[in-house]
Amino acid sequence: MEQTNSSIVDKNKNCPCGTGKSYKDCCAGPHQNISNALTSEDLMRSRYTAFVLGMGNYLIDSQHSMTRSHLNKKELEEWAGSLRWLRLEILDTAKGTIKDHEGEVEFKAYFKHKGKQEVLHERSKFLKEYGNWLYFDKM
């Protein structure tokens, strides 16, 4: 597992992604091995938590190969670190089960930036590549 800001998350406390599970029983699994994200929603939640923890490598590794070339680890970590992440709300999912090869997740990620609460509302597309769920792009 890469070096992260994970010291801000107690591995036995609730995971930042909002499932109510502990971090070690939730997003730690996909962070250690992406194949542990069994659904597109699992991957979405693990990516949100990776933003909270500043895990640039994971954010790049969990991006589909067709859409990852423009990503910069340092820029991702700086942007994620400039925000105070508040919570993730999953609004809808389509497909994205263990049996599917594509899926969609609509979500809202709440954060504070320069003292102002903001929300990122997106419907994201996920595709499987080599059997693993990966973020493809927003729709």
Image (tube, grey):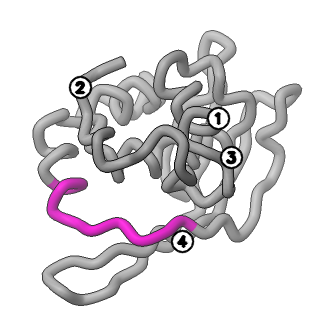
Label 1: state its secondary structure.
Answer: helix
Q: Residue sitting at 63 percent across and 28 percent down?
A: 133
Quadrant, the C terminus: bottom right
Q: Is residue 119 left or right of residue 71?
A: right
Q: Say above or below: 63 vs 87.
A: above
Q: Amino acid at mark 3?
A: Glu
Could you tell me residue 55's position as x and y percent?
30, 36
Contact? badges 2 and 1 (CB < 8 Å): no
User: How far is disc 2 from disc 4 in space, using C-alphas?
Assistant: 27 Å
Q: Residue sitting at 74 percent across and 36 percent down?
A: 39
Label 4: state its secondary structure.
Answer: strand
Circle 1 residues within 10 Å: few <14, some 14–19, many ≥20: some
Q: What is the number of the mark on residue 3?
A: 2
Front of the two marks 2 and 4: 2
Could you tell me residue 51's position as x and y percent?
35, 49
For label 3, the residue is: 41
User: How far is disc 3 from disc 2 in space, using C-alphas?
Assistant: 24 Å
Q: Earlier in the sequence, mark 3 or mark 2?
A: 2
Viewer-closest of 131 and 49: 49
For label 4, the residue is: 108
Front of the two marks 1 and 3: 1
Q: Amino acid at mark 4?
A: Lys
Q: Say above or below: 97 vs 80.
A: above
Q: Say above or below: 103 vs 112.
A: above
Label 3: state its secondary structure.
Answer: helix
Q: Amino acid at mark 2?
A: Gln
Q: What is the number of the mark on residue 25?
A: 1
Viewer-closest of 128 and 115: 115
